[in-house]
Image: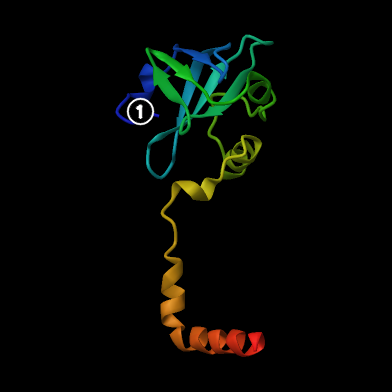
Amino acid sequence: MQTDIDPRNLIGRRAFDRNGTKLGTVDEVYLDDATGVPEWAAIRTGLFSRDAFVPLAPSELVEGTLHVPFDRTLIKDAPDFGVGRHLSPEQELQLYHHYGLDIGASGPMPDRSFGKLADAEDTKDADAQDTSADA
């Protein structure tokens, strides 16, 4: 998602699924509590006036329209929390799971080699055991 776009400018824009099928229009934008970065969009689908939450991180703004990289069926089946209220961490987690997104992927990856450096003696002992087991 383009981060230099004012989230208020997303409201009212048309949204399309990964196949180019029109989903509806962006009704509201939800910001991350910690960073203030736009994280979710509520799209008015027109189906019984229901809004569907879609993640903005993998979505793109192309020629003034929001393109969501998910199929319309998956979007329509997203958990419905109603609009105009704050999303709780539990609700966000449900949405991430629904879309198959890994919430840990957005943060920095841990330095996995650091633990091995700290336990260098244990690693040498384990390597020696592996070598002797092969003999």
Q: Is residue 3 left or right of residue 45?
A: left
Q: Amino acid at mark 1?
A: Gln
Q: Is residue 57 above or below residue 75?
A: below
- Give the percent coordinates (x, y) of residue 133: 66, 87
Residue at the front extreme? Answer: 135
Mark 1 element type: loop
Q: Nearer the viewer, residue 123 or 106?
A: 123
Can you identify the residue that label 1 sits on?
Answer: 2
Left or right of 40 in this view: 77: right
- Going by the image, does 95 lie left or right of 37? right
Q: Residues within 10 Å of mark 1 (few under 14, many from 20)?
A: few
The location of residue 115, given as percent across then percent down, is 46, 75
**Which quadrant of the rendered structure holds the N terminus?**
top left
Q: Tell me which corner region of the image, top left, top right, bottom left or bottom right, holds residue 135.
A: bottom right
Q: Residue at x 62, y 90 (%)?
A: 132
At 67% across and 21% down in the image, what residue appears? 76
Q: Position of residue 75 (x, y in %)?
A: 63, 24
